[in-house]
Image (tube, rainbow, N blue to C red):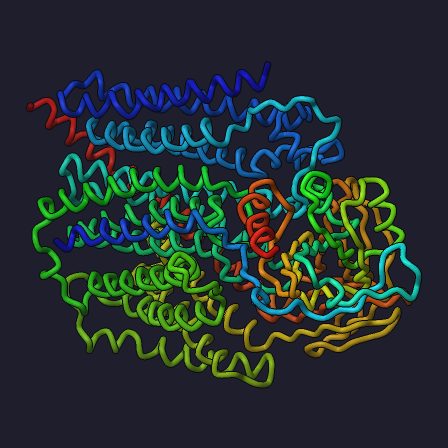
């Protein structure tokens, strides 16, 4: 019997790996889910100097907050799909241009198109830190009360939209 | 055309591997010498096919054929020739091709050197190696084909990952694979022994040089990896307990245990089933490492583009190969061994070697546990955690420290039965000398000591002195020094050198941990800092351009007389948009001065990370000594002479039959 121990241990390990393959170890659940979106007060890209947008201003309808930057390759990757979502699905996108020069952000949006209803400027990245952003692009789903109900890390994809985001948006509205 | 030729050669190799696996098995069942004979020719044909495929891929890299997806992803017109050749194994697909090339190379070597073995055993070994090759060739052809074409053809490649553009890292993977894959030979010998029922001292003697050879490559591969990480990553550390480092270290521990248990099996005919199990484990852990690196189940700095389909393939492959081997073991091993463990006395050479095995295997198990623990929690939805150096150091150090004590005792205790009194007589002077050295050296060099430095120094000095005793006694028993030195067999030199290497390594680890100094500091041009008793003056930074990168190069004058020039760099590779730090190290036997550039500020000042690392060289020097020891042991003429004698015996037996 003791000669069979190794093969039994192996079976346990294999089962573990099979389950592990279905998980993405890089996927970290945000501790902010179920909580109110962290407060900010940010300037608007292309807006007059005095215009400021605060977290409360996003309330009243479900909204997608997308952190992006002109220097980020993943953002360019998802951009065409965001354009499509804005056009076809009227996705309520608010962009936060993260650690970027306003001129670079404007030029980038002029070149690739602007899917956002509003673009805010997080010049020093402090809002990103408050929101727990550790790499752009990241997309937060907020309900009408400004509560974070989901966070998507990395470029937006068709699967992620249909599986994780669209149903939540619909449930929230 | 060339890529298609390579692709075709791979498919051909798969066909040959099928023949190499199935025909010898049939030959063994039917006792048909012709079918058994196929194994050797098939092994050679397979090596030829894979070498052709590999040469084709290398050709595509050298000629920058971006019509291949894999070449377009990892090659660049500006990449120097040397790195275009090493870029072949710079990512998943090509490194797998290198893997099967090395596997077929080992198989070829077995087919050549095993002509002296009984034909049926040799054919079974080659058959098992063929089956491993089938799995990897299928893996390449089905999920990871490096010959996939790309259309439209891009004008420029995406470039080799800049972090791999370093000579140390360029040769690290081939060395590591030589070790990983080399354990497949010990594995094949173990399976052949289980199938044929020939599990005896002769089997152990045949397996030993193969195991030692694989081990020495793995030792060198790990040493190179550690040295590279120290030089390149800019953290000044030499081991990080990263999952992928652990994946290479676990087979090393199992392989080290195997080398020692093979000695017992050969000399005393004991521990047979344990030795077979270790041979299976060493290779299984190599496969596990492959799985962990390429499936993406764990987070690691060694990120291959991970793909669940690939992960699933390796998982199934592991289930078949390791599951099959362990099932065979569960069925066959009880019949092949008769309660031999009862015959072992703890206080004897074999008893101490068994103890050594226990510590090594438990250490490997502890590392496995720590590496997989995040995966277990995640799989059970208990949360996301990571297990870091505090766990590994706390578990590993107490498990490994007794091994140093054992090395010294094991060297003087005879086989079968030891005697406490004579052991003490032989060890009391080495123990006293080690104690004196351990206390004297740190005070002489640094004027102070820590508990870690004293304990580490004691273990190190003890290991070096006690390990040298065997050679010393052999030399002393001869009339002249030269006669004496010549009379020491290579295997004994090898063992001695490897054990000395272990001691040297421990010295480096203990001292660099105890007497090292580090400082993060922002320096203006021409400002100075003092770290660990050494001065570092920052002379400013300027722009330098390399063949395929732009660099900021700092200039630092270091040392007590500020006479050592150090030029750390921060390189920007535009092809991938990547920044890399290139640390500057002034290496010395007793200390390293190490500077890496942080961030530059508008006023011309820079943040710098400065380390003084006493005796850090000893860590890799220890690894090199183990490697050299392995070389000497594996090339001992005993293996060649005994084999010649065996061939006569086999020939005689065949004639009688």
Q: Decide if residue B557 is in sight here.
A: no
Tell me residue B113's x, y (percent): 32, 31
- Residue in the image at 48% along x and 60% along y: B622
> Quick check: B24 above or below B577?
above
**Which residue is most to the top?**
B1
Q: Is residue B186 left or right of residue B230?
A: left
Q: Is residue B648 left or right of residue B321?
A: left
> Quick check: B631 above or below B385?
above
Tell me residue A115's x, y (percent): 76, 45
**Which residue is most to the bottom?**
B448
- Residue in the image at 6% along x and 23% along y: B657
Which quadrant of the rendered structure holds the C terminus of chain A? bottom right
Q: Is residue A131 left or right of residue B32?
A: right
Q: Is residue B337 left or right of residue B258?
A: left
Q: Decide if residue A152 is in sight here.
A: yes
- Residue in the image at 54% along x and 59% along y: A28
């Amino acid at each position: 019997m003791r000669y069979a121990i190794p093969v039994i241990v192996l079976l346990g390990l294999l089962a573990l790996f099979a389950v592990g393959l279905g998980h993405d170890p890089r996927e970290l659940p945000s501790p902010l889910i179920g909580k109110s979106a962290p407060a900010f007060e940010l300037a608007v890209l292309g807006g007059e100097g005095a215009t400021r947008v605060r977290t409360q201003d996003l309330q009243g309808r479900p909204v997608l907050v997308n952190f992006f930057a002109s220097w980020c390759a993943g953002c360019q990757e998802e951009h065409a799909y965001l354009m499509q979502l804005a056009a076809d699905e009227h996705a309520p996108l608010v962009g936060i241009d993260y650690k970027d020069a306003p001129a670079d952000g404007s030029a980038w949006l002029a070149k690739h198109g602007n899917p956002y209803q509003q673009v805010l400027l997080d010049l020093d990245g402090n809002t990103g830190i408050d929101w727990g952003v550790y790499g752009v692009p990241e997309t937060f789903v907020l309900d009408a009360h400004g509560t974070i109900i989901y966070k998507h890390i990395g470029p937006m994809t068709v699967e992620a939209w249909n599986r994780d985001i669209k149903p939540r948006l619909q449930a929230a509205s | 055309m060339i890529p298609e030729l390579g692709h075709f050669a791979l498919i051909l190799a798969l066909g040959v591997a099928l023949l190499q696996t199935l025909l010898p098995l049939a030959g063994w069942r039917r006792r048909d010498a012709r079918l058994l004979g196929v194994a050797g020719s098939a092994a050679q044909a397979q090596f030829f096919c894979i070498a052709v495929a590999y040469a084709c891929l290398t050709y595509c890299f050298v000629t920058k054929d971006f019509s291949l997806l894999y070449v377009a992803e990892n090659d660049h017109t500006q990449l120097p020739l040397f790195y275009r050749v090493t870029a072949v194994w710079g990512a998943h697909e090509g490194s797998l091709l290198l893997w099967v090339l090395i596997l077929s190379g080992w198989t070829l070597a077995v087919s050549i050197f095993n002509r002296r073995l009984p034909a049926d055993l040799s054919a079974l070994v080659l058959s098992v190696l063929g089956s491993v090759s089938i799995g990897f060739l299928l893996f390449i052809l089905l999920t990871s084909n490096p010959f996939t074409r790309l259309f439209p053809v891009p004008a420029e490649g995406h470039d080799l990952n800049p972090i791999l553009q370093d000579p140390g890292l360029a040769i690290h993977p081939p060395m590591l694979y030589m070790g990983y894959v080399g354990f497949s030979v010990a594995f094949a010998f173990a399976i052949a022994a289980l199938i044929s029922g020939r599990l005896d001292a002769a089997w152990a003697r045949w397996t030993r040089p193969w195991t030692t050879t694989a081990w020495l490559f793995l030792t060198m591969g790990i040493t190179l990896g550690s040295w590279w990480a120290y030089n390149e990553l800019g953290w000044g550390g030499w081991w990080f307990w990263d999952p992928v480092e652990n994946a290479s270290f676990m087979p090393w521990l199992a392989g080290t245990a195997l080398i020692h248990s093979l000695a017992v099996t050969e000399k005393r005919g004991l521990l047979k089933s344990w030795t077979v199990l270790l041979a299976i484990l060493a290779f299984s852990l190599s496969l596990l490492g492959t799985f962990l690196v390429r499936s993406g189940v764990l987070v690691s700095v060694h990120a291959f583009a991970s793909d669940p389909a690939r992960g699933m393939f390796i998982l199934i492959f592991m289930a078949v190969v390791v599951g099959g081997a362990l099932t065979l073991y569960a069925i066959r091993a009880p019949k092949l061994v008769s309660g031999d463990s009862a015959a072992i006395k703890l206080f004897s050479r074999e008893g101490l070697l068994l103890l050594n095995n226990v510590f090594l295997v438990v250490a490997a198990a502890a590392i496995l546990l720590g590496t997989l623990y995040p995966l277990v929690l995640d799989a059970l939805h208990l949360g996301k955690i990571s297990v870091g150096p505090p766990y590994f150091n706390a578990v590993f150090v107490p498990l490994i420290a007794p091994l140093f004590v054992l090395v010294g005792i094991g060297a003087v205790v005879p086989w079968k039965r030891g005697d406490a009194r004579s052991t003490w007589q032989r060890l009391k002077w080495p123990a006293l000398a080690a104690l004196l050295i351990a206390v004297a050296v740190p005070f002489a060099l640094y004027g102070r000591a820590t508990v870690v430095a004293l304990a580490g120094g004691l273990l190190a000095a003890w290991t070096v002195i006690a390990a040298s005793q065997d050679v010393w006694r052999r030399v002393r028993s001869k009339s002249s020094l030269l006669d004496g030195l010549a009379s020491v067999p290579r295997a004994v030199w090898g063992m001695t050198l490897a054990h000395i290497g272990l001691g040297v390594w421990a010295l480096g680890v203990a001292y660099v941990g105890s007497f090292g100094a580090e400082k993060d500091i922002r320096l203006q041009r021409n400002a100075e800092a003092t770290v660990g008793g050494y001065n570092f003056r920052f002379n400013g930074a300027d722009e330098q351009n390399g063949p395929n990168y732009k660099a900021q190069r700092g200039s630092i004058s270091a040392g007590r007389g500020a006479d050592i020039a150090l030029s750390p760099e921060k390189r920007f590779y535009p092809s991938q948009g990547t920044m890399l730090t290139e640390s500057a190290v002034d290496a010395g036997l007793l200390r390293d001065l190490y500077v890496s550039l942080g961030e530059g500020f508008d006023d011309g000042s820079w943040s710098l990370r400065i380390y003084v690392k006493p005796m850090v060289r000893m860590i890799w020097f220890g690894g090199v000594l183990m490697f050299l020891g392995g070389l000497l042991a594996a090339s001992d003429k005993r293996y060649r002479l005994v084999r010649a004698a065996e061939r006569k015996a086999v020939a005689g037996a065949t004639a009688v039959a």
